[in-house]
Image: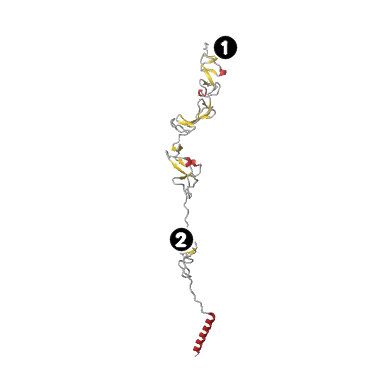
């Protein structure tokens, strides 16, 4: 009897509460329409909480290109292609930027000591210094073609080939002709030689000694041999002066460096009414 009473009381209580507060709300799970663009430009497509397709915050492409990663997906990094250096550009053989095709990084004498992108070609090939196409192996760019250079000072030569300026070929070797007052002679190959009309005067003749280019000595000029004196003059063995050697019976004048030849003496002689000096043979003595 009591049980029936309690059941009726509970039913009455529930009816009163329903009348006062209304029916309890019914929960309906929200539905998200897919197609959302996620962070980093990724396509979403989540369906409700707890029922997501493709992971949190949409079906994103993750960092580094991984599918399903969080917070969007970035495109993998692609470095810019390395552009080769132009001909003539300064370069580093161990650097990241190579020279253009066919060119190498070189620091030869033609690049001013700096490493530059250049092309090196061989004999008889086309060359152009302004385009950084240089000759190699000691060749020289002449009229746009790599050729062997002419021999230089002290090197063997032929008159047909000649020598590098300012030398010229003389006695089979390249040497330079120099002007009056310049150094000449010496023991080395290719020593300077005097220009035409000059002679190399060596103050103290000895093997390998050098001298100075001078005009041929006039009477009274210092000399070491007749080669130091002008044509027709000799070098007096006693005083080392250029002089004129006079034959017997000819006028002589030591003051003017006109000496008698060996074996003769210059003596004062009167001829008619004139007194003059003449080269004569020594008088024989009868005593």
Residue at (45% x, 42% y) in the render: 120
Q: Position of residue 258 (x, y in %)?
A: 54, 18
Residue on which the image places disc 2: 65
Residue on which the image places disc 1: 275
Q: Position of residue 107 (x, y in %)?
A: 49, 43
Q: Position of residue 229 (x, y in %)?
A: 52, 23
> Label 2 neighbourhood size at 10 Å, few (<14), some (14-19), many (20+)?
some
Residue at (50% x, 87% y) in the render: 8
Q: Is residue 110 visible?
A: yes
Q: Position of residue 101 (x, y in %)?
A: 44, 46
Along the line of sight, the residue nearer the viewer: 61 or 170: 61
Along the line of sight, the residue nearer the viewer: 116 or 39: 39
Q: Does the CB distance between marks 2 and 1 fall below 8 Å?
A: no
Alpha carbon separation for disc pair 2 and 1 = 128 Å
Along the line of sight, the residue nearer the viewer: 177 or 284: 177
For residue 127, which quarter of the picture? top left
Picture layout, residue 224 above or below residue 85: above
Q: Tag 1 or tag 2, which sits nearer the N-term?
A: 2
């Amino acid at each position: 009897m009591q049980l029936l009473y309690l059941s009726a009381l509970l039913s009455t209580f529930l009816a009163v509460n329903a009348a006062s507060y209304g029916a309890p709300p019914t929960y309906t799970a929200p539905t998200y329409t897919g197609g959302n663009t996620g962070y980093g430009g990724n396509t979403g497509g989540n369906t409700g909480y707890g029922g997501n397709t493709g992971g949190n915050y949409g079906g994103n492409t993750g960092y580094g290109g991984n599918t399903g990663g969080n917070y969007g997906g970035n495109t993998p990094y692609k470095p810019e292609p390395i552009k080769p250096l132009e001909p003539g550009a300064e370069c580093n053989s161990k650097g990241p930027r190579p020279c253009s095709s066919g060119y190498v990084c070189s620091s030869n004498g033609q690049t001013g000591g700096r490493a530059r992108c250049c092309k090196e070609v061989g004999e008889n090939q086309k060359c152009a210094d302004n385009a950084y196409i240089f000759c190699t192996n000691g060749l020289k760019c002449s009229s746009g073609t790599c050729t062997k250079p002419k021999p230089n000072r002290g090197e063997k030569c032929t008159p047909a080939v000649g020598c590098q300026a300012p030398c010229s070929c003389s006695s089979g070797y390249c040497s330079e002709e120099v002007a009056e007052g310049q150094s000449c002679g010496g023991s080395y190959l290719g020593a300077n030689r005097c220009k035409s009309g000059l002679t190399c005067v060596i103050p103290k003749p000895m093997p390998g000694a050098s001298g100075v280019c001078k005009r041929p000595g006039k009477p009274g000029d210092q000399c070491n041999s007749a080669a130091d004196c002008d044509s027709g003059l000799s070098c007096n063995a006693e005083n080392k002066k250029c002089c004129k050697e006079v034959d017997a019976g000819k006028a002589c004048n030591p003051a003017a460096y006109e000496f008698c030849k060996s074996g003769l003496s210059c003596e004062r002689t009167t001829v008619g009414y004139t007194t003059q000096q003449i080269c004569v043979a020594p008088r024989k003595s009868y005593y």
